[in-house]
Amino acid sequence: MPAPAFAFLLLATSIDVEGGAIAEARRGEVPVELDQASHPATVSVITPTAGVALHAHEASLRLRYGPRLSWLQIHDDTPRSETKQPFVLHQLELLGIWRAERGLTYTVRAKTNVSQISAW
């Protein structure tokens, strides 16, 4: 663990843990192959999230992670190989807030999304 993060952990006056989940379902048409017609389909998505927030007197640091799991079901008679594994999009967010003198607030946010290459 880097020294500044470890020092902040020691100086934290409170630690919050959060968790939750979002579920979505959509119906419409999706392209399956390049330069081909779209097909009727349903997309189901589940996004569980977990996070931790460290709070000190004048600063807070929040780290949140949530994998977005998506499944696609195509509604036609076109033969294709079935995939049972979901498409996974890893989402990671880091947020730091520091309240300085004279009412100034500095905010730093870093967010990244990483996914696997997947052919539906």
Image (tube, rainbow, N blue to C red):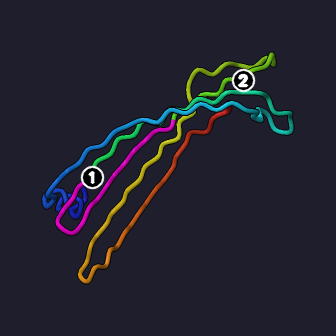
Tell me if residue 19 comes above or below residue 72 in the rendering: below
User: Neighbour class for label 1 at 10 Å: few (<14), some, many (≥20)?
Assistant: some
Tell whether label 1 touches label 2 (CB within 8 Å): no
Q: Position of residue 102 (x, y in %)?
A: 26, 83
Residue 108 falls left or right of residue 55 = right
| Residue shown at the point (13%, 61%) measured from the top left | 11
User: Neighbour class for label 2 at 10 Å: few (<14), some, many (≥20)?
Assistant: many
* Residue linked to disc 2: 74
User: As rendered, which of 3 and 61 lies closer to the eye?
Assistant: 61
* Residue linked to disc 1: 53
Label 2 SS: strand
Residue range highlighted in magenta? 53-68
Q: Is residue 107 magenta?
A: no
Q: Which one is earlier in the sequence, the residue at label 2 or at label 1?
A: 1
Label 1 SS: strand
Mark 2: amino acid: Ile
Tell me if residue 31 comes above or below residue 6 in the rendering: above
